[in-house]
Image (tube, rainbow, N blue to C red):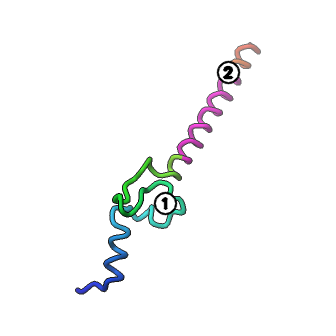
Amino acid sequence: MRYSRFWLLKDLYWCFIPLTCRQCDDLPSCRSSFWKGRKCLNGCVRKKRREAYLRELDRSDYLDHLVQSIEEKENK
C-alpha cells in the first residue's frame, strides 16, 4: 500500500497524540510544537479543569455536611 505525500505528512503531524486529544480545542495549550515532538506539556487541560471542579464540589459537600452535623449536635 502506497502512501501519498499528503497522508504521510498528516500521519507525522498526529504522531504521539492520542485519539481523544486530536479533536480538542485546547490542543495547542497542552502540547508542545511539532518540532519539539508534540510532547505533553502539563497534561490535559480539560481533565485538569474537571478535576479542579470535582475537588471544589467535594470540598463544598464536606463543609455542608460538617455544618449540618454541628447543627444536629447543638439541637440535641
Identify the residue at image location x=65%, y=23%: 66
What residue do we see at 41% from left, 60% from top?
33
Q: Residue 34 location, x and y as percent?
A: 38, 63
Q: Earlier in the sequence, mark 1 or mark 2?
A: 1
Q: Is residue 61 magenta?
A: yes
Q: Residue at x 55, y 47 (%)?
A: 50
Question: Magenta stretch?
Answer: 49-68
Query: Which label was assigned to residue 27?
Result: 1
Determine whether, in the image, residue 7 is placed left or right of residue 30.
left
Q: CA distance from mark 1 to mark 2?
A: 44 Å
The 10 Å Cα crowd at callout 1, few under 14, some 14 to 19, many 20 or more, is some
Residue 62 pos. (x, y %)? 62, 29
Q: Amino acid at mark 1?
A: Leu
Mark 2, other Cα within 10 Å: few <14 / some 14–19 / many ≥20? few
Q: As drawn, is 10 to the left or to the right of 56? A: left
Q: Circle 2 sits on which residue?
A: 69
Does the magenta-highlighted stretch encompass residue 56?
yes
In what element is the residue under mark 1? helix
